[in-house]
Amino acid sequence: MVSNRPIAPVPLTPPRLVSLQDRPYWAAWAALCLTPMEALAIAHAFPTLEAAWKSNAGALTAAGLPPATAARVTTARQTIAPDGLLRAQTAAGINLCTLWDDDYPALLRQIPDPPI
């Protein structure tokens, strides 16, 4: 059963300091193509992005992800190694940039639903 339940508004402020340890998990979550509000809901609901990554579908749903998305996450993460993904992106010249990085594009910060 697919839920059309909207995700509760989540502030665009970081739930905590975005640490170097979280960066591989930001890359992994980004690879799953979550909406910005889904990504923020996850970031606010768990103590770390690693904890969110390792959580079960029920915990992801409780955090605000639709059940179908939570199921997709638990399946997809079996084939994604966050550290390896970030290393591969870096080697390919891809720079991970979150909303809270200094080099995040200023104009993107101004739209209602900016990429995280």
Image (cartoon, helix red, strand yellow):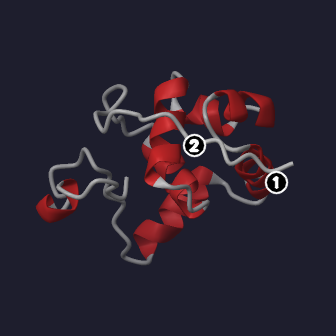
Q: Amino acid at mark 2?
A: Pro
Question: x, y percentage for residue 40?
Answer: 45, 40
In the image, taking residue 60 as reference, residue 20 lies left or right, namely left
Distance from the alpha carbon under mark 1 to that under mark 2: 22 Å
* Residue under the point 57% across and 43% down: 6
Residue beneath label 1, please? Answer: 75
Mark 2 and mark 1 in contact (Cβ < 8 Å)? no
Number of on-image labels: 2
In the image, taking residue 42 as reference, residue 21 lies left or right, namely left
**Observer-nearest residue: 91 or 14?**
14
Q: Amino acid at mark 1?
A: Thr
Instruction: Please determine whether, in this image, residue 74 is positioned above or below residue 114.
Output: above
Instruction: Please determine whether, in this image, residue 31 is positioned above or below residue 66.
Output: below
* Residue under the point 76% across and 60% down: 79
**Observer-nearest residue: 37 or 2?**
2
Within 10 Å of disc 1 (Cα), the crowding (few <14, some 14-19, many 20+) is few
**Observer-nearest residue: 67 or 19?**
67
Q: Residue furthest top?
A: 47
Question: x, y percentage for residue 28?
Answer: 57, 54
Instruction: Choose mark 1 or mark 2, whichever is in front.
Output: 2
In the image, taking residue 115 as reference, residue 69 lies left or right, namely right
Within 10 Å of disc 2 (Cα), the crowding (few <14, some 14-19, many 20+) is few
Residue beneath label 2, please? Answer: 6
* Residue under the point 71% across and 34% down: 61
Question: x, y percentage for residue 86?
Answer: 49, 59
Secondary structure state at the residue bearing disc 2: loop
Secondary structure state at the residue bearing disc 1: helix
